Amino acid sequence: MRALMRRTWLDLSSHKFLNLITVITVALSMLIVSAFLLFAANTGELLDSWRRGVRMMVYLQEGLDDARRRDLQQTLAKLPDISEVRYISKDKALQQLRRALPGQASIFATLRKNPLPDAFELRVAVGAASPQGLQEIATTIRSVPGVSDVEYGQQWLARFADVTRLLRMIGYTMGGLFLAAGIFIVANTVRLLLYSRRDEIDIMRLVGATERFIRMPFYLQGILQGALGGALGVTVLYLAYLYVAGGFRHAGLAGAFSPRFLSPAEIGALLLGSTLAGWLGCFLSLKQFSRLQENG
Amino acid sequence: MADDPIIRLFHVHKHYGSKSALADISLTFGRGEFVFVTGPSGAGKSTLLKLLYLGTPASAGQILVDGMNLARIPRKRIPYLRRRFGIIFQDYKLIASRSVFYNIALVLEAAGERSALIGKKVRHMLRSVGLEKKADVLPPSLSGGEQQKVAVARAMVGGPQIILADEPTGSLDPDSAAIIIGLLEDFHARGGTVIVATHDREMIRRSRRRVIALQDGRLATPAAREAP
Ligand SMILES: Nc1ncnc2c1ncn2[C@@H]1O[C@H](COP(=O)(O)OP(=O)(O)OP(=O)(O)O)[C@@H](O)[C@H]1O
Ligand SMILES: [Mg+2]
């Protein structure tokens, strides 16, 4: 075992530059793969809410009794493209507002009467959430008796979700491509090493070394390159994340959108993936190499 | 000696493409025997040795090494066959980019020897060929004779059953040659089998061992020919 480590170290240190380049290139591809993964992780929630539909608030005229309110709720629910209708009473709305603005208790204290209207919160189905579609629905609802106003501020969400979805698709493709690139890079390095050491490998065979003995350092090297490259890539991504998240906080956006970093499980999967890529690259080269030798 | 053969060849042929290198060789090497194989350049001496460790397969005929039929050895077992041999190659076959020490230690590492013993055994071998000061040197910076000594040390360090020596004194001065021959004799005296391929008539004459002469790929001395 110690001898194996020493042989691997000898291999690594006698091709320092080549190995360094390999690790850095693997790190770059893993950086890109993990950056897309991070993007996907942070937009997942957004896409979920998008999938449930765009939110639309319908404010009610004052003094509607319970029966008329229930009628109205049914009317709204029957409209096409409305997936969910939830009643939010003005008391509940005020409570929510209080909770959202804990520093402003004095304002609420001066209120003698709840100024907020009763409301319905609607979800407009994804398919109808184009800007015109939303506008048409809003117009229809405004003309329903008992409705005082309609508000929807999330058209941007529809467009943003489309872009996000596209970016994620591109991300998965690019991630896949760069993972393949990582495998290819390790394979290429191992191939270079194999050819530069053909004589040595022949000699090892002649003095009774098994194929396993000969290949082990190459595998170890490929695995090490994969693992180191992955770790380096994730580290760089983490630094970038700290920088960007810090920017968000300074801009006062922390409450609205606080990006998270990859979970330990996701990081583990990434490292495992890049290690496997290193192993696979090595495996492919060794296979090609031994096929060539059998033919030659 | 023929009662306890360690290597037997039956009508062995070897050709490279259409060119014949060895034809109809039938031979027996006894366990613990010391044999010379001689003959002019191109006679097939190196080829004969090569067949024994499966450096190349025979084209026809059978070869038995310690009871194993070489034609039937699966690929995976070849390394274990080779560990029975200590081979001194005519062109040394040292790894140019690795130290002398590493070149010799490689045999032991490949055989799975314990690390603690490797250093000891390698240093002992280096001392016996008089190269203890060259352990960390790369082979290309050694003289031809020194490289040959490293090759000898490597062939012996693993404790093989059989030593195949292809011109082991080819580039040595008489004193160094005597040291190498002495090592081979010691190995033989401890019960090892030695097969030496050489042109060196003087060495053959002095040692009075059995001589197998090859000529154009055929056995040339009727005396050495043995019925299978
Ligand atoms: N790998 C090979 N490919 C083709 N021909 C070969 C090969 N190896 C040996 N030969 C041929 O086989 C014949 C025997 O070669 P071999 O090396 O066995 O001779 P040798 O007796 O060892 O000669 P020397 O004394 O010069 O070492 C030669 O004619 C040589 O050209
Ligand atoms: Mg020869």
Image (cartoon, coloured by chain):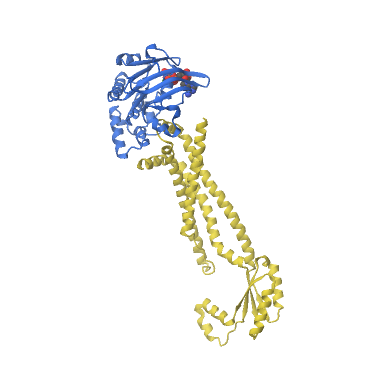
Chain colours: A yellow, B blue
Residue B17 sits above or below residue A163 on the image: above
Residue A132's spot in the image, x, y percent? 70, 68
Q: Residue A70: horizontal and vertical position, in percent?
A: 65, 81
Q: Nearer the viewer, residue A144 or A77?
A: A77
Q: Is residue B196 above or below residue A183?
A: above
Q: Quadrant of residue B72?
A: top left
- Residue, x 57% and y 87% (percent of image)? A113
Q: Picture coordinates of residue A170 (x, y %)?
A: 60, 54
Image quarter where the N terminus of chain A lies is top left
From the viewer's perspective, tell me whether residue A180 is left or right of residue B181.
right
Q: Out of B159 and A88, give the one closest to the viewer.
A: B159
Q: Nearer the viewer, residue B2 or B59?
A: B2
Identify the residue at horizontal 51%, vertical 53% (top origin): A31
Q: Is residue B171 visible?
A: no
Q: Along the line of sight, which residue is nearer the eye, A109 or B156? A: B156
Furthest residue to the top?
Answer: B222
Determine the image quadrant of residue B36. Answer: top left
In the image as oriented, which residue stretches furthest toward the bottom? Answer: A112
> Residue A32, image x and y in percent?
53, 53
| Residue B98 visible in the shown view | yes
User: Residue B31 is drawn in which quadrant?
Assistant: top left
> Is B8 placed above or below B157 here?
above
